[in-house]
Structure formats: C-alpha cells, structure tokens
Amino acid sequence: MSLSHAILATLSNGCYSGYDLSKQFAGSVGFFWYATQQQIYRELGKLEEQCYLSAELVRQENRPDKRVLSITAAGKEYLREWIMQPGTISPIKDDLLVKLFAGHLVDRQMILIELQHHRTQHQATLNTYREIERQFFADPAQCDGAGELRYLTLLNGIQVENGWLNWCEQAIAMLENDSRREALPTTSQ
C-alpha cells in the first residue's frame, strides 16, 4: 500500500481542502497508515498530476480562498484496481521490539519502564477506539455497507490494542519475576 491509496480512500468519503483532508486522514485512515501533513500535501500534488483527484477553488470572504479536492473517476478506478489486488502482510517496524531484542545491554529496570510506557500508550489508543465505537458504532447492525467496513477496521484496531496490552502485561510480569529472582541472594549448599 502506498500513501496515495490511503489519501484516495479518504477522499472516497467526501471532498476536502488539503487542511481538512489532513484532519480527516488523521482521524480515520491515520490510525493505521501514518503520514505527516507535509507528506500528504506532497502526495496530493502527484495525485492531481495523475488526474486521480481534482481541485476546485472555493472563494471565501475574510479568509484566503481554498482548494477543495475530490477523487476523480480515474482515481476511483485506480483505487478499485488496487483493492482487488491480493494484499501482503506488512512487516512490523517497532522500536520496542528492537529494544527488547537488544535489551540485555541495559539494566532490566529500563526495559520494564519502557514496557510500562508502551502499555500506557496502548491503553490510551484503546480508549480512543472505544470512544469512536461508542460515538459512531453504538449499533453496528444499523451500519450501511461502507459503515460496516469502517467498523471492521475499528474492530481490528481494538483487537490489536488488546493484544498489545495482554502482551505488555505478560512481558512485564515475566521481567518483574526474573528481576525478583535475580535480586534474591544465592545460598550455597
């Protein structure tokens, strides 16, 4: 997947100015495909050159004019073709896992602190997802087709965060147990 697909997926739900698109992106697709505002703006120029999106200048009083972007028929076809292609599992790129892999180089307490920090972050993300679920998907059975698919992406996020939290708890318990064992004085027999 590329950033262009994520942007076009966001635009498939409505027309936005570049600024509004960045906000919409961050609050939807951005949960599973991160991009900075600068990356988004750069990609928008490329998508417009490829005729996958179009821009309409909207005049505003007492504010600068804004360009409202929309996906074109060619952009929808490009997105459809990509959706129909078999996907591949994305490789994990996670700082925490690399730190754990080489964690023997530092005091175990530093690794525990890092795990606790990540547990807090994953709990906050899970809380955000649960709030989105409460606000927008209180009754998933009432969702239309597009809403149902968005809900499925949210459910994945909830499961991923629950998985991270469970793993963090297990890792913390294991390392705390090992730390206590290491701290016990050894007895000679």
Image (tube, rainbow, N blue to C red):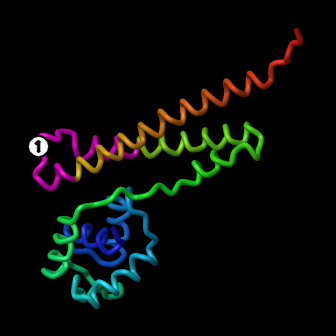
Compared with 165, 38 (above or below) is below
Residue under the point 61% across and 52% down? 98
Q: Which residues are magenta?
A: 127-149
Taken as a whole, is the magenta stretch helix, strand or loop? Answer: helix
Would you name the residue on which mark 1 appears?
Answer: 142
Residue 128, visible in the rendered structure: yes
Compared with 78, 46 (above or below) is below
Find out whether residue 6 is within the magenta segment: no
Residue under the point 15% across and 76% down? 77
Compared with 106, 185 (above or below) is above
Q: Position of residue 101 (x, y in %)?
A: 63, 47
Between 51 and 142, which is closer to the camera in this rendering? 51
Q: Position of residue 150 (x, y in %)?
A: 23, 53
Residue under the point 43% across and 64% down? 34
Compared with 106, 60 (above or below) is below
Residue farthest along the front direction in this orientation: 189
Q: Judge from the rendering whether residue 120 lies leftward or rightward of residue 38; answer left or right.
A: right
Which quadrant of the structure image shows residue 183? top right
- Is the C terminus in the top left, top right, bottom left or bottom right quadrant? top right
Q: Position of residue 123 (x, y in %)?
A: 48, 40
